[in-house]
Image: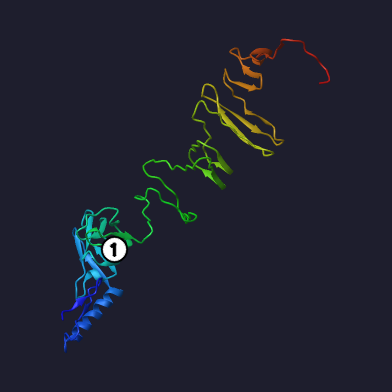
Amino acid sequence: MASTYTQNSGIEKPGTGDQSGTWGVTTNTNFDIIDRAVHGQASIAIFGDTTLTTNNGSPSDGVAPVIILTGTPGATFELKVTPNDQKKHYTIKNETDSACRVSYQGVSYSQSNGVEIVSNSTQAVTGDGGGGSGVFKSLTPSTDLINDLTPQLGGSLDVNGQSIVSASNGNIVVAPHGTGHVDINSDLDVTGAVDVTGDLDVDNVNINGNGITVTNTDANLTLDGNGTGKVLISNLSYPSADGTASQVLTTNGSGVLSFANASASLGSSITIGNWTIAQDGSGHLTFAYNGDTKVLVTAAGALHVEDDITAYSGI
């Protein structure tokens, strides 16, 4: 009676009454196959597409649970597993310079029936032994953030003292879905420009050497204290109308906001409600209500008013 072999590892099973006086050789070989199948490693030098074979009745690379691929093939290569009717479970470490595609012999590789292992990475894979329609699947959670189009975090992201850096002058975009906000629960240190298209809730903003600029000419810059909160400004500067000088608003010790450097150029103005305070072309200071000048102080110090001057009125 002829020997038969186990389905997935090719261990020989002598027929009843066979190999009398010689069965010890077969048994020792079987133990070697079992040992390799349980704890073995196979190191395979890769030059291109490679076949990973499991032999019947002798130890082979295809029976080892750990496969280490080495070499510099220079292009994506396929690792074809044969026989294709054997169930397999491999941990494959790809130390080559190229991606490895694992699938069964006789099966055209695709993402649905094989596993791609990028260079210098390791994956656990399993094959179903489905013959010409056999499938290999990955058992390793994906850590490939380049090819994974929808990566998700299972917990908080710890940068471990490192930075999140873009390349080639690219932007780093944080875009919450729907009505979600970007909440920063600690200090925010900014050394460059900050572009915000939605709400920005920040406990503490530190602007290091840069300003807050509204680049959309139709947009307003709104500082809203909300409820009983206050917007505290210790120093506020803004460019003049002609762009050659600057005026600075600063608070004194009592919290009064005033001009620290009143170097406003001609044509500059301050609007408070319906009132506008401006300097005209002759250097006079004018106070206008709804566009109509009510008070004028000349450069020489003369005071002109449109209506009566009332003293000690008890206002």
Residue 121 in view here: no
Could you say where residue 234 lies in the image, as x and y percent from the top left? 63, 36
From the viewer's perspective, tell me whether residue 202 is left or right of residue 40: right
Residue sitting nearer the eye, 99 or 127? 127
Could you say where residue 268 lies in the image, as x and y percent from the top left? 58, 20
Q: Is residue 98 above or below residue 308?
A: below
Could you say where residue 92 lies in the image, as x and y percent from the top left? 29, 64
Q: Determine the residue positioned at 51% across, 25% down.
A: 218
- Residue that numbered label 1 is attached to: 127
Q: Secondary structure at mark 1?
A: strand
Q: How is the image coloured?
A: rainbow
Q: Is residue 246 above or below residue 187?
A: above
Furthest residue to the bottom? 21
Residue sitting nearer the eye, 242 or 169? 169
Assess disc 1: are there few (<14), some (14-19) or many (≥20) residues with their C-alpha within 10 Å of its C-alpha. Answer: many
Q: Quadrant of the C terminus?
A: top right
- Name which residue type carries label 1: Gly
Which quarter of the figure has residue 31?
A: bottom left
Residue sitting nearer the eye, 117 or 291? 117
Tally the numbered discs: 1
Residue 133 in view here: yes
Could you say where residue 95 lies in the image, as x and y percent from the top left? 28, 61
Q: Determine the residue positioned at 59% across, 22% down.
A: 264
Q: Is residue 207 above or below residue 290?
A: below
Which quarter of the figure has residue 241?
A: top right
Q: Quadrant of the N terminus?
A: bottom left
